[in-house]
């Protein structure tokens, strides 16, 4: 039984084999996750990182902000509902504070705003049209199948929207439509990540 090691012991052995980490590596390991937690806290309690970053020593702020940046970027998403829209605003406001080149960030934010407006307007129309086409297609197929089984005189009404197959197909369609927007958003987020 003494040969069984805990996960902690195994991890400590691996760390020992890596050799002594530099001070910078130790700071990264400790404070980047701290920055991630701080960013999550900012998003959850509607605070801004500007008011919280001053609690940290200047020496470690860059690591804190690096971790926070990761979380803020990850929390910018396609505005499918009001909650996501609010989260986007909080993440983008905090990210603007973190970045040094504010004008470059604002240029990308203009692209993101255009993308989000397009999603809300033309994208909404596209989703509504796709939904109606899918519904009509399913209705026609279902009526043909019923007519073949029971004869054309049957008057069975089925709500196709409640069918699991319809719902599954709709999820695929909406996922495909949203992927177009997600691809652009991912590009813009990568541009944001590359800004100092």
Image (cartoon, rainbow, N blue to C red):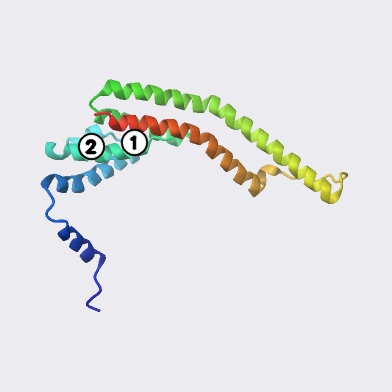
User: Callout 2: few (<14), some (14-19), or many (20+) C-alpha neighbours within 10 Å?
Assistant: many
Can you give x and y, in whole percent of width and height, for residue 2 in the image? 22, 77
Quadrant (top left, top right, bottom left, bottom right) of the C terminus: top left
Number of numbered markers? 2
Where residue 190 appears, as percent x and y from the top left, is: 34, 33
Q: Nearer the viewer, residue 124 or 87?
A: 124
Residue depicted at x 82% and y 51%: 149
Residue at the spot of label 2: 65
105 is higher (above) or lower (below) than 186: above
Label of residue 73 in the image? 1
Q: Is residue 94 visible?
A: no
Mark 1 closeness class: few <14, some 14–19, many ≥20 residues within 10 Å: many
Taking the image as shown, residue 173 lies to the left or right of residue 160, namely: left
Label located before the other in sequence (2 or 1): 2
Q: Residue at x 13, y 36 (%)?
A: 58
Q: Secondary structure at mark 2?
A: helix
Instruction: Using residue 195 as the reference point, say whether residue 140 is left or right of it.
Output: right
- Residue at the far bottom in the pictured view: 1
């Amino acid at each position: 039984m003494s040969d069984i090691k805990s996960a902690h012991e195994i991890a400590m052995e691996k760390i020992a084999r890596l050799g002594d980490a530099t001070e910078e590596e130790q700071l990264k390991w400790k404070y980047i996750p701290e920055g991630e937690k701080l960013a999550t806290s900012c998003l959850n309690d509607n605070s801004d990182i500007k008011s919280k970053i001053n609690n940290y020593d200047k020496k470690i702020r860059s690591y804190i902000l690096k971790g926070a940046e990761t979380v803020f970027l990850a929390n910018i998403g396609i505005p499918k509902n009001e909650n996501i829209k609010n989260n986007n605003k909080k993440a983008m406001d905090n990210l603007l504070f973190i970045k040094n080149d504010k004008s470059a960030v604002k240029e990308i934010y203009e692209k993101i705003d255009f993308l989000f407006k397009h999603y809300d307007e033309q994208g909404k129309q596209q989703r509504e049209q796709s939904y109606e086409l899918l519904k009509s297609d399913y209705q026609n197929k279902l009526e043909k199948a019923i007519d073949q089984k029971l004869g054309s005189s049957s008057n069975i009404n089925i709500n196709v929207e409640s069918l699991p197959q319809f719902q599954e197909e709709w999820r695929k369609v909406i996922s495909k439509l949203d992927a177009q927007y997600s691809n652009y958003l991912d590009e813009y987020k990568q541009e944001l990540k590359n800004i100092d």
